[in-house]
Amino acid sequence: MNVVVPLIATLGINNKVTFLEKHGTSEFQNSTGAYELDLSLVSNFSAAWRTMNLQTDVFCSGSVILPDKAGRQINVGGWSLDSTFGVRLYTPDGSPGVNGTNDWEENFHELSLLAGRWYPGALVLSNGSILVMGGETGSNASPQPSLEIMPLPAGAGTVHLDFLERTDPYNLYAAHIPAIIIFTHAMPSSYPFLTMLPSGRVFVGYYNEARILDPVTFATVQVLPNMPGAVNNSQVIDNCVSIQPEVPNATWTLERMPSRRVMSCMVPLPDGTMMIMNGAMEGVAGFGLAGDPNFNAVLYDPTLPVNQRFSILNNTIVARLYHSEAILLPDGRILVSGSDPQTPGFPEEMRIEVYVPPYLNTGIRQPQYSITATDFGYNQKFTITNVQVFHGSIANIKVSLVAAVSSTHGNAMGARTLFPAFTCAGTTCTITTPPNAFVSPPGWWQLWILDDVGTPSHSSWVRIGGDPAKLGNWPNLPGFTFPGV
């Protein structure tokens, strides 16, 4: 059971889950808007939940994890008025079984966005700064077709984006997971979808369009083909489209999901597959506008041939419609939460579930390893020791890195999965970090090892690429603390 109806769920580097709720607009008026769940204490309800506090309303805001050494969570934008300018920071503290004391920090008078944004996309750039893009000036209000950078460079302001102005309000509908970009349709109410590409340029998907931007000027470098299939806000369909945006003559691949789905969540898993779950089979996102929940979970494997990539899994238990989330836990399971549809017959959903993917249903004991150093540069070698697998041999393991994400509205902001090079000798494996900040933008990653049939270990948090934008010294303003660099 939950104490909140969350619209944003984030796993912190303290391995606790923060939940943010649409504070001022919630029907639960005693809510503080923010809570943290200690998964190690779930058998003790009162001890597992820690109450936190927000000052403004995060309804339809965006969140990412900063690459600073504290792994702070930043949340931007929101519902209306001052909330749309909101910049909120939380430093995860404590450890499993030990309560933290930090809370969300916010001082609207000292630090705010340049432009008010409802439904902004957010992304950590390869230089370590934060890109905030798009949205509207308030709930169902005029467009905010621009981007801005945080911390704000000297002399900089917002950058106007004519393609967002032209496609408003339709660019507030979509869902993705990079490195191959994947969208599922029909599109839920959502954000411009952003990812860094291996060239160092920025991919943005919006409405049924996509383009590549220069990472310095943010001018359009390339307009990609429009996404195929129907794109509308009334007929739920079974489209899944994917693209490798930087190959020559890049085109979209259209596949069919096993069932129709709107407002889906996609979770990148340590074996490189993606779990698709939640949403509805009729209607659109928003309050009272969708029904016929899609309980079925689907696994998508991008390594399989086209039209053979979907596997139908067991159903979930709870209807998850508007404002539902799904995130990967350190033990390889998926935490599923939320649903705030205001549709007759479907409650404000306070229950949470844990979904067990197929790789944990084989009865095989999960691999184990030890790690000491956890802060690395690029193209750097580090070791993990005491590597143990309980199926096959160490010679056949895989190593993966899954980026820290924040889940909301069908968007796993920051999602990225990499398989670094490694070698093993005995029970020690030497891993080589990614080559540069384009392949691997600075940030925090869950490090996994997998046995020869894909059973994952528990993850450890590692940071790759440091803090090149010196976010650890930002913001040096009243009302905020910062970890330093």
Image (cartoon, rainbow, N blue to C red):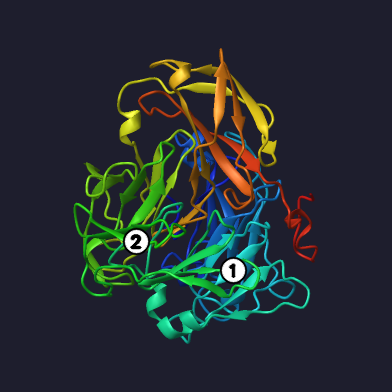
Residue 214 marker: 1
Query: Residue 45 at what x, y percent from top left?
Result: 46, 40
SS assignment at label 2: loop
Q: Residue at x 43, y 15 (%)?
A: 393
Residue picked out by circle 2: 348
Q: Is residue 155 visible?
A: yes
Q: Amino acid at mark 1?
A: Asp
Which residue appears farthest toward the bottom when viewing the image?
142
Label 2: few (<14), some or many (≥20) within 10 Å?
many
Closer to the camera, 121 or 345?
121
Residue projecting furthest to the top: 426
Where does the image place residue 457, in percent across and percent down from the top left?
47, 27
Q: Nearer the viewer, residue 405 or 304?
A: 304
92 or 128: nearer the eye? 128
Q: CA distance from mark 1 to mark 2?
A: 42 Å
Q: Could you tell me which residue is drawn at 26 percent across and 49 percent down?
A: 306
Position of 24 with respect to 54 (left or right) is left
Question: Which residue is pictured at 47% across the width and 18% down the height?
Answer: 395
Figure check: 260 above or below 317: below
